[in-house]
Image (cartoon, rainbow, N blue to C red):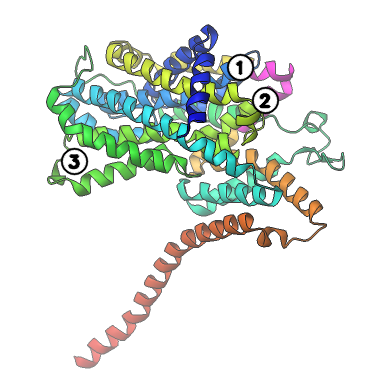
């Protein structure tokens, strides 16, 4: 971390503490905690719903609020995981194992307190990692040409397959569907409408907010209504969330290790908070002298994954802000929000909009401090929120969705299109197709095409530019390695089954001959 980074961070605090930005940071972390607490409502859904509300805001203020929702949800997800064994957020699944066991043992306050403290420490550590690495990566990214950016976007799409749920083939299909949706509209080079099917509303392309709201907002609401609500009763009354001294002694090392693992995995495109939480939990269980305690109320099983997912939530911003590469569904939404405000994600953000870049990073430190206070002192408020029936929430959510979509272009067509995507999103949920790769393809597709065509124009049609350029060749090699890694395990399983089935007749014949 050099002195320029410290100077930039100091300037970012001057932006973040402005009254409007500070207020929206508070609103963001409160909303994030709220959506993390509510089962079935996550940061992806909430950010997609609130995107229209940010149109009238300053870009810095809008991104500060949306970022607060994201890392605030990592805090809130642990509350339902510990009290009800219902993870409000995907990354809180592992917290259920030991957190809920602690709650049954009457130690819910300790579990909630360690979760909040670990999240704060990891959030601050992850933010400092962003401060340290971002200037270095920005300097490297400024040397990228069109061929390099094409290969980088390709790596991002391929890397999303590593963490996609529902199978590799389904994830590939989702990526191609996103790529096709991304090219709907008028070609900027020829001025010809593509895939508009004679609909004038589609000549400008499909609005990002319509796709996000439909797939994640409407689709999740339909699925939640079908499955029913999880209105359970709390195992016990919780007045505060302060851990004991012994719990702090037992958890500080897992918090440190989890912070490091989460921060490292969060930087990698395609990795996310859930991957970091899983890795941290696995490590703690392997190095523990008493691994049999895990799953039965081990405080380390709460501290490590909670620290990992919050550190990863901060460092997830590094690929987006420095390379313009979303690392997951939430970061794709953040990239869409930046584009809506006329800001192209990538290294130019730091050089052309330093107040946005450093203001956003400084707001993360402020937001994590606010979240620590909220989660240690307002736990009774979140407990009451858990008792609100979902049947009262979803009509309000649908109403806000429809108003927000209509406000995009004052068009009923957009509302109908979002409803159509909602049905598609529900179909994806029922068939086990994760919509996040589709969103990645939708965001990266136009940039992928633009850099491909630009590279070919500059090279006068010579496609070897992608393998003769060192940076591009290296990134393509990484993409090939990822594809090979994805193909290796199914191929090995197939060969193992084939060899096993081939040996069976011989073994049977040998046994018969012996008899």
Check the image and report above or below for 60 versus 289.
Answer: above
Q: Answer yes or no: do the residues labelled 1 and 2 have beta carbons within 8 Å?
A: yes
Q: Earlier in the sequence, mark 1 or mark 2?
A: 1
Residue 449 included in the magenta stretch of the image = no
The residue labelled by disc 3 is 294
Q: Mark 1: few, some, or many residues within 10 Å (few <14, many ≥20)?
A: some
Q: Earlier in the sequence, mark 3 or mark 2?
A: 3
| Mark 3 vs mark 2: in front | 2
Residue at 37% across, 13% down: 388
Q: Position of residue 115 (x, y in %)?
A: 27, 26
The residue labelled by disc 2 is 340
Q: Residue furthest front?
A: 3
Q: Mark 2: few, some, or many residues within 10 Å (few <14, many ≥20)?
A: some
Can residue 88 be seen from the camera position used here? Answer: no
The residue labelled by disc 1 is 54
Q: What is the distance, in whole Å, between disc 1 and disc 2 at their CAs?
A: 9 Å
Q: Secondary structure at mark 3?
A: loop
Q: Quadrant of the C terminus?
A: bottom left
Q: Nearer the viewer, residue 267 or 442?
A: 267
The answer to which image quadrant residue 444 occupies is top right
How many dots with numbers?
A: 3
Q: Is residue 291 left or right of residue 410?
A: left
Residue at 34% across, 39% down: 260
Residue at 44% across, 20% down: 32
Q: Mark 3: few, some, or many residues within 10 Å (few <14, many ≥20)?
A: some
Q: Which residues are magenta?
A: 404-421
Q: Position of residue 206 (x, y in %)?
A: 71, 32
Q: Residue furthest bottom?
A: 513
User: Where residue 160 is drawn, which disc sits there?
Assistant: none
Q: Earlier in the sequence, mark 1 or mark 3?
A: 1
Q: Position of residue 348 (x, y in %)?
A: 65, 33
């Amino acid at each position: 971390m050099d002195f320029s980074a410290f100077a930039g961070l100091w300037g970012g605090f001057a932006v973040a503490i402005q009254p409007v930005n500070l207020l929206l940071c508070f609103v963001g972390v409160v909303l994030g905690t709220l959506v993390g607490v509510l089962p079935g409502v996550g940061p992806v859904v909430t950010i997609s719903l609130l995107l229209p509300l940010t149109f009238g805001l300053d870009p810095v203020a809008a991104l500060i609020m949306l970022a607060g929702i994201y890392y605030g949800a990592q805090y809130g997800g642990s509350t339902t995981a510990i009290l009800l064994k219902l993870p409000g957020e995907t990354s809180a699944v592992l917290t259920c194992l030991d957190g809920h066991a602690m709650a049954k043992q009457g130690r819910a306050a300790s579990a909630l307190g360690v979760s909040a403290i670990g999240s704060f420490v990891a959030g601050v550590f992850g933010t400092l990692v962003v401060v340290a690495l971002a200037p270095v990566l920005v300097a490297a990214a400024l040397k990228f040409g069109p061929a390099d950016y094409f290969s980088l976007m390709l790596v991002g799409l391929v890397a999303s397959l590593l963490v996609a749920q529902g199978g590799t083939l389904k994830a590939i299909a989702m990526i191609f569907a996103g790529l096709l949706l991304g090219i709907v509209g008028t070609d900027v080079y020829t001025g010809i409408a593509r895939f508009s099917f004679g609909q004038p509303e589609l000549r400008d392309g499909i609005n990002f907010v319509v796709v996000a709201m439909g797939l994640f907002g409407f689709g999740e609401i339909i699925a939640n209504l079908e499955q029913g609500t999880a209105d359970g009763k709390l195992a016990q009354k919780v007045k505060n969330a302060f851990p004991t001294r012994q719990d702090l002694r037992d958890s500080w090392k897992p918090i440190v290790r989890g912070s490091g693992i989460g921060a490292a995995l969060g930087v990698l495109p395609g990795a996310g908070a859930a991957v970091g939480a899983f890795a941290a939990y696995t490590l703690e269980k392997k190095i523990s002298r008493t691994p049999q305690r895990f799953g039965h109320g081990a405080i380390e099983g709460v501290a490590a994954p909670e620290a990992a997912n919050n550190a990863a939530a901060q460092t997830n911003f590094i690929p987006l802000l420095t390379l313009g590469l979303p690392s997951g569904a939430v970061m794709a939404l953040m990239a869409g929000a930046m584009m809506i405000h006329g800001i192209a994600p990538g290294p130019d953000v730091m050089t052309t909009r330093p107040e946005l870049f450093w203001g956003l990073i400084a707001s993360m430190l402020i937001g994590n401090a606010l979240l620590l206070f909220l989660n240690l002192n307002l736990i009774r408020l979140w407990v009451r929120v858990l008792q609100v029936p979902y049947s009262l929430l979803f009509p309000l959510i649908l109403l806000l969705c429809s108003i927000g979509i209509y406000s995009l272009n004052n068009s009923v067509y957009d509302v109908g299109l979002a409803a159509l995507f909602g049905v598609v999103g529900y179909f994806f949920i029922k068939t086990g197709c994760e919509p996040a790769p589709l969103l990645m393809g939708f965001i990266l597709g136009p940039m992928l095409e633009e850099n491909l065509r630009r590279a070919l124009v500059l090279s006068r049609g010579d496609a070897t530019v992608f393998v003769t350029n060192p940076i591009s060749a290296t990134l393509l090699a990484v993409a090939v390695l990822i594809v090979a890694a994805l193909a290796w395990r199914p191929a090995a399983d197939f060969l193992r089954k084939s060899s096993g089935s081939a040996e069976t007749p011989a073994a049977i014949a040998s046994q018969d001959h012996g008899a």
